[in-house]
Image (cartoon, rainbow, N blue to C red):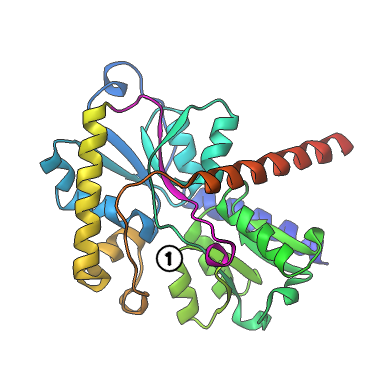
Amino acid sequence: MKQLLICFLTVFVILSCDSRSTGEIPAIEGEQADSGVLRLAVIPTLDCLPLFLASEHNMFGRAGLEVAIVTYSAQMDCDTALQNGFVKAMATDLVRAEHLRQQNIPITFLSATDADWLLLTSRSARIKKLSQLDDKMMGMTRYSATDMLGDLAVDSGKLKEERVFRIQVNDVVIRQNMLIGAMIDAALLPQPQATAAINQQSCLILRPQARFDLQLGVIAMRENSLSKEQVEAFCKAYNEACDSLNARGLQSYSELIKKLTGADQQTVDSLPVMEFRHTRQPRERDVERAREWLKKKLEKADVEKQRI
């Protein structure tokens, strides 16, 4: 019965994602691809707020950089846009960035970010601790930070990997709604989707990045896609946006958060205090841990394919 339900949910998620699709992502060729405009892909999460603020308030423009923000609801769409040359940079995580490198896409980092994911459970599931995830369904994105953090949570709960069913839900809003609607038992959600779910009585059972001392959020770009001057301009504007957010607080930018993420006012009012740090390179130990985890995951996937 559990396997049939998982199959049904997989079909549902595919259809749901198709209905929210932003359309085909074309490749850019010739002069347009080489223009001085930095096309930057974001998803509707709070780690992208400094980028959105710097764009909306012309901080990039004042720094001498022309930026076009392109918003997607799933990280995989950002990956496709980068692969096809439609964008030069994107907000992502170290696991997904490393996965692109495995596909021979040259990636470098503009900065680490303060992206965070919380492990939440559905109100109706009545799960209060990790050991109760046995025989439950967890929403995540394959080969991403949520996939890695989900594995670490399962290991920490001393559960067998095959006893926690992973449901791939790439769209963060659909994942949030499936958790609230009890279509899945648990999910790894970023902000503000995590706060929206908590307001609907979802239960927070783990802060994985804090527990495992991981910082996985990054802004990645294709190697050599920006000049030194453009990188400096980007950092100047990004840091200005961070300073403004830290000085004024999230509530001062309620309308901007609602525009970026689709969050309602109750969610914005309930957001925890956040600190947005200046541009910096990701910690090498985080890069290595993401790389090692992905290597093992891909090797295991290859073994399973050979068995079929």
Instruction: Give the position of the N terminus as an image quadrant.
Output: bottom right
Q: Residue furthest right?
A: 307
Q: At 56% across and 45% down in the image, what residue appears?
A: 95
Find out whether residue 180 is within the magenta segment: no
- Residue 123: x and y in percent read 60, 82
User: Is residue 209 shown in magenta?
Assistant: yes
The answer to which of 178 and 221 lies nearer the viewer is 221
Instruction: Report the span colored magenta.
Output: 208-226
Q: Position of residue 289 (x, y in %)?
A: 60, 47
Amino acid type at circle 1 is: Gln
**Residue at (25%, 43%) from the top-left corner?**
235
Measured along the vertical axis of the image, is residue 148 above or below residue 153? above
| Badge 1 density bin: few <14, some 14–19, many ≥20, Cα 10 Å | many
Nearest the viewer among 12 and 101 is 101
Residue 104, given in percent of the width and then of the height, sits at 56, 25
Q: Place residue 147 in its image quadrant.
A: bottom right
For residue 132, what is the image quadrant? bottom right
Residue hosting label 1: 191
